[in-house]
Amino acid sequence: MVIAIDGPAGAGKSTVARMAAETLGFTYLDSGAMYRCVALTCLEWGADPEQSGEATSTAESIEISFEDEEVLVDGVPVTDEIRSAEVSEAASRVAVHPGVRAAMVTEQRRLIEAGDYIAEGRDIGTVVSPESPLKVFLTASAEVRARRRAEQTGGDPREILISQMERDKRDSEREHGALMAADDAIEVDTSELSLDQVVTKVAELARERGIA
Ligand code: CDP
């Protein structure tokens, strides 16, 4: 069973999904980390993230796994490397290619098949798990999202705002797996809410629906 949490960059998906998973006893799946792994590998192998063929064969050649708090590519931990600004940018570019998306969606479905998951990303409620009984679409104003990410990473809020807006645009405009709320998603604007309030809201929704 899957609870889907989708939304744009910096809306708080990762932290909310991680904390709600802990509260409800579900397993957390960070789908964005998988696109980041493809991007990192492209950069390491000299494959062009813009080239559909190169990015797709990279995505199809690697094995991505999650172990405790670590993300691994072919058994090697890449947890910190995949968070760099360079990888964020490249992840948003590889995520446009249908072949890359197909490889990731297949793998995500395989993972979530076994057990109760809170999966977060852009297309969980629309593509990966459209049958999910609870879909939450987290939003916040662009400024709030950039400020939160700057607090997390120590980067410059204005630079982060610009790169997030570029990524959001690419995510929203792509043909496959575009960033959008599923018709039956519950939209939660987190601009004025604390992390605890959002986690409580997700847990309440899950309980109301008899999922947890
Ligand atoms: O947290 P942040 O938005 O910075 O990034 P992320 O969730 O780790 O995702 C990195 C990139 O992967 C995003 O910019 C999206 O382009 C892509 N992505 C996607 O296309 N589909 C998903 N389900 C998750 C991420």
Image (cartoon, rainbow, N blue to C red):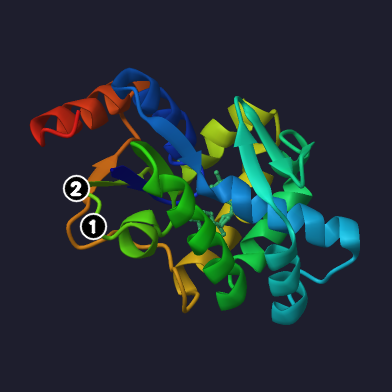
Horizontal arrangement in the rendering, residue 38 relative to residue 69 (left or right)? right
Q: Does the residue at mark 1 contact the one at mark 2 (Cβ under 8 Å)?
A: yes
Nearer to the camera, 83 or 34: 34
Q: Mark 2 CB in 8 Å range of ligand 1? A: no
Q: Quadrant of the C terminus?
A: top left
Instruction: Name the residue: 64% across, 42% down.
Output: 65
Give the Cα separation between the discs numbered 1 and 2: 6 Å
Q: Label 1 neighbourhood size at 10 Å, few (<14), some (14-19), many (20+)?
A: some
Q: Position of residue 37 (x, y in %)?
A: 70, 51
Q: In the rendered image of this protein, does residue 26 appear above or below residue 174?
A: above
Q: Position of residue 127 (x, y in %)?
A: 37, 65
Horizontal arrangement in the rendering, residue 149 relative to residue 172 (left or right)? right
Q: In the rendered image of this protein, does residue 175 appear above or below residue 156?
A: below
Horizontal arrangement in the rendering, residue 42 relative to residue 130 (left or right)? right
Q: The disc labelled 1 sits on which kind of residue?
A: Glu
The answer, for residue 166, to whether it is visible in the render is: yes
Q: The disc labelled 2 sits on which kind of residue?
A: Pro
Reading the image, the residue beneath label 1 is 131
Q: In the rendered image of this protein, does residue 75 appear above or below residue 86?
A: above
Nearer to the camera, 5 or 102: 102
Q: Report the disc number at residue 55.
A: none
Q: Which type of secondary structure does the marked residue at label 1 adopt?
A: loop
Q: In the rendered image of this protein, does residue 204 appear above or below residue 34?
A: above
Horizontal arrangement in the rendering, residue 119 relative to residue 82 (left or right)? left
Instruction: Name the residue: 74% across, 64% down.
Output: 61
Q: Position of residue 116 (x, y in %)?
A: 33, 36
Reading the image, the residue beneath label 2 is 133
Instruction: Name the residue: 24% across, 47% down.
Output: 187
